[in-house]
Amino acid sequence: MRIAVVAERLEGEGRVAITPDAAKALITAGHAVTVERGAGGHANYPDAAYEEAGATLAAREAVLGAAEVLFTVRRPDEETLSALPRGTALVGLIEPHGDKAFAQDCARRGIDAMSMEFTPRITRAQSMDALSSQSNLAGYRAVIEAASIYGRAFPMMMTAAGTVAAAKAFVMGAGVAGLQAIATARRLGAIVSATDVRPAAKEQVASLGAKFVAVEDEEFRQAETAGGYAKPMSEAYQAKQADLVASHIAKQDVVVTTALIPGRSAPRLIKKAMVETMKPGAVIIDLAAGAGGNCELTVPDQIIQHGGVKIAGFTNLPGRLAADASQLLAKNFVNLSPLLAGEDGARAPHWDDDIIKGMALTRDGAVIHPSLAD
């Protein structure tokens, strides 16, 4: 396969889809890798490292024009899409529900688009699960950002001049990002609690040394899909959970929200009135800012202040760890690549494979993913 890698054009995006090590692995497997000059610069992967790995460097137009497979971090812009030959496989974190017209555009141009967000949650696909690899880093970075914005110490410190109390951190949503946020806050010395509507999360939270906070009724015990995601909860349950959270959140110094349901707007977990009960100097980090926010007051890509509480709406926390995030994402692509090629190494997606079936948005000029087909 002729694999193409270009620089990301979205403002603030420092990641690159393929690192030099990943390029070397793909070349060893028999593929040709062409990289736009400067593509890895923001992640500290210089052109010389790609050349040493055996990749070819070229201008953007040449890279795109010869592509059979384009690995991309984010959804490409119109100019990039129009430069791809018909039949190219486009694979990346496309966020298809954020712009459903994008799939139609790919179909019209004959581009076979595949979204890494739709990687099935099966054992065989774990090494290709880019959403998890990036969410893990997002959870870590969320706590680092919180510690910076909070401006006070996280751990308890006993000194001759007095004792500094440990910060109280509350993580809302105990998926991949949430569990990493819990672990990071604990490592920094905070007193950590967490909530989630999935019953399985209780044991996971406890295993990290945090306190679990939730209304544990019958609806709670049934609140998980077969794919491991949280189910939308009834209004009655949401009201009970909101009352519990409201009383708990008023005592917290740091709150990290991570609740997202694929294809839906982010659930509103923190109302304005709840923010107004928090201490001056408290911090909210909203990982769902790009999907509408878990906090009613969140503004995407801004840090605002309301009544002394700072609310940060970062929409690309993995991009703030560009080198590590690129390394993990590139490995996801390398692990996926055998399902995009035939035995002879030529481009031949395994359309009957469950992983490709789950990821495929378009094929042969048609939108085929069930969530987008209408």
Image (spheres, rainbow, N blue to C red):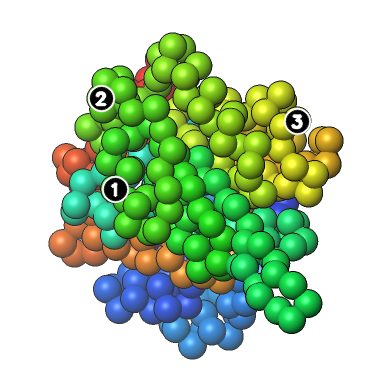
Residue at 27% across, 41% down: 200
Q: Which mark is residue 308?
A: none
Q: Is residue 233 left or right of residue 309?
A: left
Pointer 1 residue: 203
Pointer 2 residue: 222
Residue at 29% across, 36% down: 199
Q: Is residue 374 above or below residue 128?
A: above
Q: Residues within 10 Å of mark 1 (few under 14, many from 20)?
A: few
Q: Is residue 260 left or right of residue 152?
A: left
Pointer 3 residue: 276
Residue at 44% across, 11% down: 236
Q: Is residue 30 above or below residue 342?
A: below
Q: Please provide percent x and percent y for residue 202.
A: 33, 43
Q: Please provide percent x and percent y for residue 82.
A: 58, 41
The residue type indicated by label 2 comes to Gln
The residue type indicated by label 3 comes to Glu
The residue type indicated by label 1 comes to Glu
Q: Is residue 131 above or below residue 29?
A: above
Q: Can residue 263 be seen here?
A: yes
Q: Report the quarter where the C terminus lies.
A: top left
